[in-house]
Image (cartoon, rainbow, N blue to C red):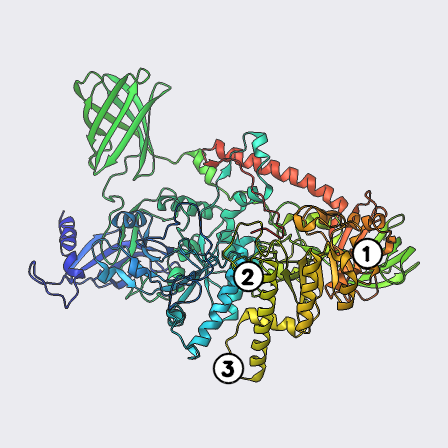
Amino acid sequence: MKIRLLCLAILWCGSTLFAQDYFPENDGVKSKNNNYTAFTNAKIYVTPTQIIDGGTLLIQNGKVKQVGKSVTIPKNSVVVDAKGHSIYPSFIDVYSKFGVEQPKRPSGGGRATQYDAERQGFYWNDHIMPENAAISKFKYDDKKAKELRDAGFGVVNSHIQDGIVRGTGVLVALNGSGDDSNRILDDKSAQYLSFSRSVIKKQSYPTSLMGSMALLRQMYSDAKWYASGNSDTKDRSLEALNENKALVQIFEAKDKGHALRADKIGDANGIQYAILGGGNEYERIAEIKGTNAKFILPINFPEAYDVSDPIAASYVNLKDMRKWNQAPANPKILAENGVPFSLTLYDLKSPSKFKANLMKAIKYGLPKTKALEALTTVPAAILGKSGSVGSLQVGRQANFLITSGDIFDKGTTLYENWVQGQKNVINDKSQKDIRGNYDLSAGGMTYTMSITGEASKPKIEIKQDTNKLKSKLSYKNDWVALSFATDKGEKNYRMTGLVSNASDNIKGKLTLPNGNESTFTAMKTSAFTADKKDEKKDSGAPEVMPVTFPNLAYGFKTKPKTETILFQNATVWTSEDSGILENTDVLIKDGKISKIGQNLSPGRAKVIDATGKHLTAGVIDEHTHIAALAVNEAGHNSTAEVKMEDVVDNEDIDIYRQLGGGVTSAQLLHGSANPIGGRSAIFKLKWGESPENMIYSNSPKFIKFALGENVKQSNWQSFSRFPQTRMGVEQVFMNYFQRGKEYDAKKKSGQPYRYDEEMEVIAEILNGERFISCHSYVQSEINMMMKVADHFNFRLNTFTHILEGYKVADKMAAHGAGAGTFSDWWAYKYEVNDAIPYNAAIMQRQGVTVAINSDDGEMARRLNQEAAKTVKYGGMTELEAWKMVTINPAKLLHIDNRVGSIKVGKDADLVLWSDHPLSIYAKAEKTLIEGATYFDLEMDKQNREAIKKERTQLINMMLKEKAGGGKTQGPKMSKKERMTCESL
């Protein structure tokens, strides 16, 4: 009783404890409470790895004064015997929005197109807002604070979660007894960034991921330029960015690939971001480890799908099923690989869900020590606050939890969460544990009563013989209130009783169904023991499906490796002057074509009998939009600064499908939303590799330009962006090339200049270092584009689509332009009305290098058949037709020294066909890239069976989860959009 009174005295003096020294006191006597509180006989986790059994924690004025086995307790101390209890540092959440009002997307008809910034005196892009400060919008929320404390959190780092650069955060102690003068630990705790635009700013740029990346690159460059005093105007955004550069930089990625993209931007600017992950880092763990970044991990694990309906279950793809199974192991895998991480409540519907998900991660193998580090020392280290929070070392804030035992055990009760030395009761630790089995006597009848669940939140079950009765229990402040109903719910019995520490039995007042009052007695017959079923259910880590490369259907268990292979007795289509060779052997070694001839010695090579089959170079698609996370950056009329290499999607199933059609290389082009588009990615279809390993080394530099209806927005009903006419399109080119010429001259002069990534690319074109692939249809515009190139003394590399190329083929040949075209597409929009299927053959005969391309995810699977159409339409020879999908696109892409034909020394990018490669009956039996087999027809059949087996296994796991009471979500189909030139 004395201890309780002393605790109340401390709480009563709380306001004086936190009063600022220099503030006058007008509502009472000014005083300061310098008493100590000592917690003795506790198991104390000073840090996750420094544990004291039977120790003492001494606190004063919100700080840890001493901790250890032998602590001298001052006379003016309140002593709390914590025998049988454990004390842990309170948790820290690095990525919160607590107390900060978040911007909301305006309702209504969506954004009006706005190309320029709304603000003056700030950066030219409204989505860059480093001047924002969370402290300016902060308001302490008692209700939310209690929810967070109840989940074990004592400190949160909050910010405005809006925009690409979001400004600074605020670090807050969840101290409801104090005020902002003491609970604000840091009003500029970190700077926050993301790839996501603001929900309230209307400026259209950027419209894409690659646009966001380009904007960040340019922003950092501009900040350096501004810091050097080179700007004639004031920019408060760049000033804030430069002021904030010494802060912790936290980047919201929310995906493994985005994390790597963010890290790349950081590395280029000498910044090590702390990265908010997406829970799928395990899929690319080696690269994630290579970032050397600290991660902030959400644990919003997906719920199982309700797959009880077989038809509905068929809509759920294997990737999503695997995610449900594999995601809870993400923290464990990061821990095993030495990647430091903290855990966050981010994206959880409620803090109350946190413990269950954390327990799931532990069940999946996350060590408890690592879990505790992820909630205490690591978040403190991320924020640079290890000297004040995150542990119970001397001098740290007195933020700690008192529990009934191991905090990560299911049955453990969290009693108190002390923040800055202030006690917050979660569950009354003096309240008796009433769980157990009882004989309940009420109204002249005896029932069996079982109280289970958590000690702080008990559950009740009452039976009459074997019949389970509807019952209810509440237990608070040593009082129980329980009720049950008999006779199918017609008769209700209500009881209230005081739990006594002197007896295990419970007695009290009973109200009978007729309203009369009586008494009840619950005689305890046995103590509570955990349910054997629950123990069995919780024992052992669940089975986790192995990760494949990529981690979806048809992924490899191990990445393909280069082999030494001898193809014997094949019909070899060389795509060289040697033509088609019968009964020929081809030896590949070290990823290259080593020998071509007859009766070659196999040595130790793997021998493939190709008798009756055809061996060709891999098909090359000069124009594709597969394997892209974005295609258009439509925010400006020129976006030369963006790079398709930034958004290569190595998990696009179309990569695998096109390998099945013999495609080995492709140019991933920007779309046709603007006259000057983005830079290309030339890549090999290395299914299972990272985007970086798919892109050609020393890749030739390309960029997409576009003409016609799309760029003047004829079909979009958009009238606010220049150009609106074909004449205007020409002026865009003239203007940009003139500016690029002037920029390049200034750069070469040695004068100070502002680095402009867009102008750098234009200058590369003028200097012959970057090549243009130009989307085109109408002859007048084709002529115009060549005249612009002539005016600025560069050669236009390729006209793509070029469906009126037959009208100007002689001029194209004279200019030196190549053509990438369709075989027989026409009349699908107005400017294609004059297209003819003889187009490719006519241009070829005029001396133009012609490739047949796809510009279509489906068509690319049969480019061999598209090439065959030129034999019908125009009388091309079979070999010349075949060159249109092999060596000709290689020439257009300036990679013909590496690929495109079967020639000694070239990359072993080969396809073994079951039949004549121009036949509709031909199947690609094997597709090799650099001597590694990325598609095999027989392996594909095995994969289909393996996928069926794995789906069945995962479905059975989900059915078991549902049967065990686990939450489920409805089946849904997640399907990647198939990109086109016009995709936005």
The earlier-in-sequence mark between 1 and 2 is 2
Q: Which residue is mark 2?
A: 637
Q: Is residue 599 above or below residue 414?
A: below
The earlier-in-sequence mark between 3 and 1 is 3
User: Is disc 3 placed on a helix, strand or loop?
Assistant: loop
Residue 337 can be seen, yes or no: no
- Give residue 793's position: percent from left, percent from top: 68, 74
Q: Is residue 69 above or below residue 278?
A: below
Label 2 sits on what residue type?
Asn
- Give residue 654's position: percent from left, percent from top: 66, 48
Compare residues 121 and 542 and report the one nearer the observer: 121
Q: Which residue is mark 3?
A: 752
| Residue at image coords 90%, 62% | 578
What mark, if any, has residue 842 been given in the picture? 1
- Give residue 516's position: percent from left, percent from top: 17, 18
- Crowding at label 1, few (<14), some or many (≥20) Cα neighbours within 10 Å? many
